[in-house]
């Protein structure tokens, strides 16, 4: 996940402003967030088969989504984004589990046009990385799967995950705080990203369950 150079996010934004920016994204996506958590179903009991199907869905999505974000972020933000790319971790996990990877054509990927779209979409996936730490613990407890044998994606940055989330928060604030239209576009892109994930998993999990 290392990029060719370091990008340092500005950390001097007022806490209240950061909270306001994140609150608007959180409020806009609350319903979709609950739907995808219920649909994916990794918060409670699950088996290896279900886990494998979820990994395949995220892999298909990320292989389409990561290039879309890279095309729309400003150049100076690309090194930061590159350090957090995780599609290759899913490829590694699927190989460890003996499962085939699915191409991006198996997923619904949101259309992103500009930096506000990209930042709103990143809210979804960086938040998912943060929540993935709980899933990683669940994997270790229930299936004895860790970062070395099929759980690298949800382990993500490990102990550095919370720091990356703080970087995203500061980055979103610095890019969106003075532009109400951009904040609205970011919120819309976050909603569309959740909806794309929901559509991907509704199709994929239904098809695999039927098979």
Image: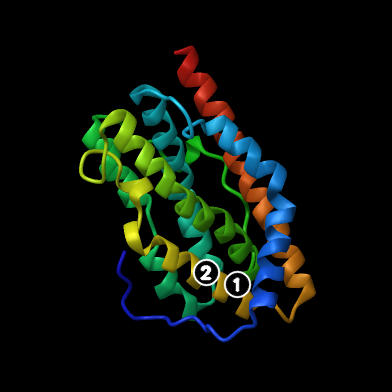
Quadrant of the image containing the N terminus: bottom left
Say which mark, if any, is on residue 172.
1
Q: Is residue 20 above or below residue 120?
A: below
> Is residue 202 shown to the viewer in this render?
yes
Secondary element at image label 2: helix
Q: Is residue 165 above or below residue 32?
A: below
Q: CA distance from mark 2 to mark 1?
A: 6 Å
The 10 Å Cα crowd at callout 2, few under 14, some 14 to 19, many 20 or more, is: many
Residue at mark 2: 168
Residue at the extreme bottom: 12
Q: Is residue 85 left or right of residue 145?
A: right
Residue at figure coordinates x 54%, y 76% from the top left = 74
**Which residue: 30% across, 42% down?**
151
Residue 137 quadrant: top left
Asked if disc 2 and disc 1 are in contact, CB closer than 8 Å, the reply is yes
Q: Position of residue 61 (x, y in %)?
A: 48, 44
Left or right, 49 with respect to 123, comes to left
**Residue 127 rendering spot, x and y as whole percentages:** 53, 55
Residue located 70% across and 62% down the image: 23
Q: Residue at x 61, y 80 (%)?
A: 174
Closer to the camera in the image, 48 or 14: 14
């Amino acid at each position: 996940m290392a990029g060719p150079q370091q990008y340092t996010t500005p950390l001097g934004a007022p806490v209240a402003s950061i909270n306001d920016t994140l609150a608007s994204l959180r409020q806009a996506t609350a319903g979709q967030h609950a739907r995808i958590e219920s649909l994916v179903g990794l918060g409670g009991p699950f088996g290896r088969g279900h886990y494998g199907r979820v990994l395949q869905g995220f892999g298909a999505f990320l292989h389409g989504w990561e290039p879309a974000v890279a095309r729309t972020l400003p150049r100076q933000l690309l090194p930061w984004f590159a350090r957090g790319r995780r599609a290759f971790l899913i490829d590694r996990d699927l190989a460890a589990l003996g499962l085939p990877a699915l191409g991006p054509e198996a997923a619904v990927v949101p259309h992103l046009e500009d930096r506000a779209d990209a930042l709103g979409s990143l809210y979804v996936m960086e938040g998912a990385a943060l929540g993935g730490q709980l899933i990683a613990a669940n994997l270790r407890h229930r299936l004895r799967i860790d970062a070395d044998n099929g759980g690298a994606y949800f382990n993500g940055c490990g102990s550095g995950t919370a720091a990356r989330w703080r970087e995203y928060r500061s980055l979103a604030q610095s890019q969106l705080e003075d532009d109400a239209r951009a904040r609205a576009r970011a919120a819309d892109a976050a909603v569309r990203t959740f909806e794309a994930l929901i559509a991907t998993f509704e199709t994929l999990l239904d098809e695999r369950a039927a098979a």
